[in-house]
């Protein structure tokens, strides 16, 4: 089980690096991608559930699409804290969050717990 978890983490960090390569305005160093991944995981476990709950009505109206906005905000928050994890603006954060979400979903689909 530990080996699969390490592979998933490594692939998700690689997904962040790939996203930075694909999206203009998102720059990340290797070390910042690792720390950014860790901080993003912590933020997604603590702050994100509260925001999801607070924005439940708008999330309901948009059929869950507002969750992408929250994911973009969480990614943008990480860029404000981690040096070397630079996101130019909210729209770059939103696009990057979408790509990272797709990569993370693919990793989870192919590497089960």
Image (cartoon, rainbow, N blue to C red):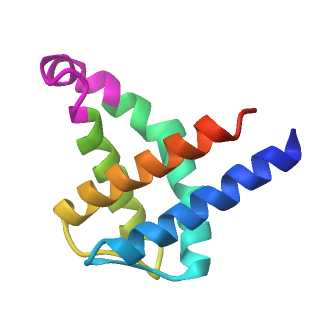
101 inside magenta stretch: no
- In the picture, the quarter occupied by the N terminus is top right
Q: Residue furthest front?
A: 110
Q: Please state the horizontal and vertical placement of residue 3, each as a whole percent of the image.
A: 86, 49
Q: Residue at x 19, y 16 (%)?
A: 60
> Which image quadrant for residue 109?
top right
Q: In this view, does 9 lie above or below 71?
A: below
Q: Which of 80 and 109 is in front in this view?
A: 109
Question: Which segment is the magenta one?
Answer: 52-66
Is most of the magenta stretch helix, strand or loop? Answer: helix
Residue 27: percent from left, percent from top = 38, 80
Quadrant in the picture for residue 78: bottom left
Judged left or right of residue 110, residue 48 is: left
Q: Quadrant of residue 61?
A: top left
The residue shown at (48%, 42%) is 44
Number of disc labels: 0
Residue name at image x 21 percent, y 34 percent:
66
């Amino acid at each position: 089980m530990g080996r699969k978890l390490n592979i998933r983490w490594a692939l998700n960090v690689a997904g962040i690096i790939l996203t930075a390569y694909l999206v203009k305005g998102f720059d990340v160093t290797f070390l910042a991608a690792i720390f950014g991944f860790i901080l993003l995981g912590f933020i997604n476990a603590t702050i994100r559930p509260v925001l999801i709950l607070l924005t439940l009505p708008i999330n309901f109206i948009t059929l869950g699409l507002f969750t992408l906005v929250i994911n973009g905000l969480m990614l943008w928050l990480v860029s404000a804290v981690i040096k070397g994890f630079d996101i130019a603006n909210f729209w770059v954060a939103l696009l990057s969050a979408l790509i990272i979400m797709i990569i993370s979903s693919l990793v989870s689909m192919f590497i089960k717990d």
